[in-house]
Amino acid sequence: MQQYLDLCQRIIDEGTWIENSRTGKRCLTVINADMIYHADKNEMPLATTRKSFWKAAIAELLGYLRGYDSAAQFRAIGCNTWNANANDNSDWLANPHRKGEDDMGFVYGAVARNYPKPDGGSVDLVRQVVDDLSKGIDNRGEIITFYHPASFHLGCLRPCMFQHQFSILDNTLYLNSYQRSQDVPLGGNFNAVQVFALLKIMAQITGLKPGKAYHKIVNAHIYEDQLELMRDVQLKREPMTLPQLNINPKIQSFEDLETWVTLDDFEVTGYQHHEAINYPFSV
């Protein structure tokens, strides 16, 4: 929690104002931030200086792993984060590749599960990594990526957290996640939960011990309409002890994740927090 608060204070103290053409708003911005999450100690990086609704973050992660490409699919598993980008993004609404209401296009998990090959066909990057890790294989390139620049015009949004690389050391699984851009007040906690949960899930279904997750954020920013709430409310609150994430031990395979797993299979215990803060969301 403290490393997150330190990043927020750094943005306020050192940030530069940047105009964002997509949202039409200014962002107070710094370049490069590195976070570490201790999955080995089950210290869930869930914000305690405001109430955080963690279930949507894990639901979105499940949708990515399943390759969902519709906001309706995400809603069905408890995640509403794609409604606006699928249905309220003016550029996407005018895009001839949009298939209709709730269509997200070729983004995130849809890319990773069907990554285009230059000679035709596609590769299921998620399945490939799961299979390798389950066999104890680490070729220094166990990478799941959502980033495919040649296909950006086919989706409603470029990926923000775009790549996850797994490594095995002494039967322990480590994760390095890379994020090109982050709305820190809203996305910071959301993305931290996803990185942490991804490592724990992947370790469980591959029979490995969870280690540490390393989360690199390149462009970290606070929107101008979020600044006052961050500076005058959240940063004045004292952090509390981090909670723990418990995953149903019956989840033993990638097929389980694809077929029957729901949010009921995840439980957060020991979560103490301050009141919620209603930060504005920018589409």
Image: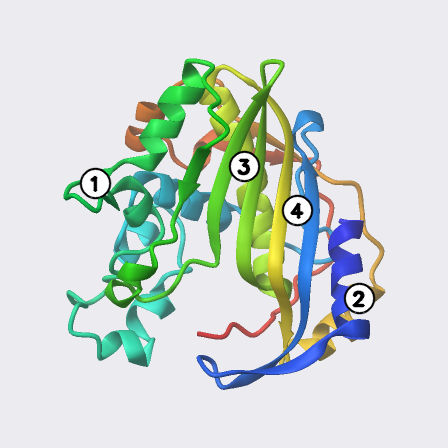
Q: Nearer the viewer, mark 4 or mark 1?
A: 1
**Three-letter amino acid code at disc 2?**
Gln
* Residue 133 in the image, given as x and y percentages of width and height: 44, 21
Residue at mark 3 to residue at mark 1: CA–CA distance: 27 Å
Q: Nearer the viewer, mark 4 or mark 3?
A: 3
Q: Is residue 248 above or below residue 13?
A: above
Q: Is residue 104 above or below residue 250?
A: below
First of labels 2, 3 by sequence position:
2
Which type of secondary structure does the marked residue at label 2 adopt?
Answer: helix
In the rendered image, which quarter contains the C terminus?
A: bottom left
Q: Are marks 3 and 1 in contact (CB under 8 Å)?
A: no
Q: Nearer the viewer, mark 2 or mark 3?
A: 2
Which type of secondary structure does the marked residue at label 1 adopt?
Answer: strand
Q: In the image, what residue occupies the spot 71% across and 27% down?
A: 41
Q: Which residue is mark 2?
A: 9
First of labels 4, 1 by sequence position:
4
First of labels 2, 1 by sequence position:
2
Residue 46: numbered disc:
4
Residue at mark 4 to residue at mark 1: CA–CA distance: 36 Å
Which type of secondary structure does the marked residue at label 4 adopt?
Answer: loop
**Three-letter amino acid code at disc 1?**
Ser
First of labels 3, 1 by sequence position:
1
Q: Which residue is mark 3?
A: 197
